[in-house]
Amino acid sequence: MTCFFCKGQMEEKAASFMAEVDGRIVVIKNVPSQVCRQCGEVSHSRAVALALEDMVKSATALTTEVSIASYAELAA
């Protein structure tokens, strides 16, 4: 697979994902990703993207301002 932006080679790698929703910050670590070796662009499969969306929705329902979790723990 090649990078959409620079056409570099993508490799399977765990990466962190961060989102800010309504003033709350959600960080999900160890997300299965494709990362460009050349520019560092990160992309996710459709299944992972849908899972991240659900995880962010769940995390923003909490009363904390910052939530940090591991993908493997939330996906289980």
Image (spheres, rainbow, N blue to C red):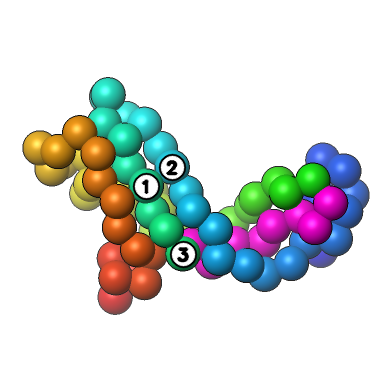
Labels 1 & 3 near each other (Cβ < 8 A): no
Which residue ends up furthest to the left in the rendered image? 63
Q: Main secondary structure of the magenta part?
A: strand
Question: Which of the 4 quarters of the picture holds residue 10?
Answer: bottom right
Question: Which of the 4 quarters of the picture holds residue 50?
Answer: bottom left
Residue 55: x %, y % from top left: 31, 53
Q: Residues within 10 Å of mark 2 (few under 14, many from 20)?
A: few
State the count of labels. 3
Decide which of tag 2 and tag 3 comes sooner along the chain.
Answer: 2
3 sits left or right of 31 in the view = right
| SS under mark 1 | strand
Which label belongs to residue 18? 2
| SS under mark 2 | strand
For label 3, the residue is 30
Amino acid identity at mark 1: Val
Decide which of tag 2 and tag 1 comes sooner along the chain.
Answer: 2
Labels 2 & 1 near each other (Cβ < 8 A): yes
What is the span of residues highlighted in magenta in the rendered image? Answer: 31-38
Residue 44 appears anywhere in the view? yes
Mark-to-mark CA distance, 1 and 3: 10 Å
Work out which quarter of the rendered image holds the N terminus and state it: bottom right
Work out which quarter of the rendered image holds the C terminus and state it: bottom left
Mark-to-mark CA distance, 2 and 3: 12 Å
For label 1, the residue is 27
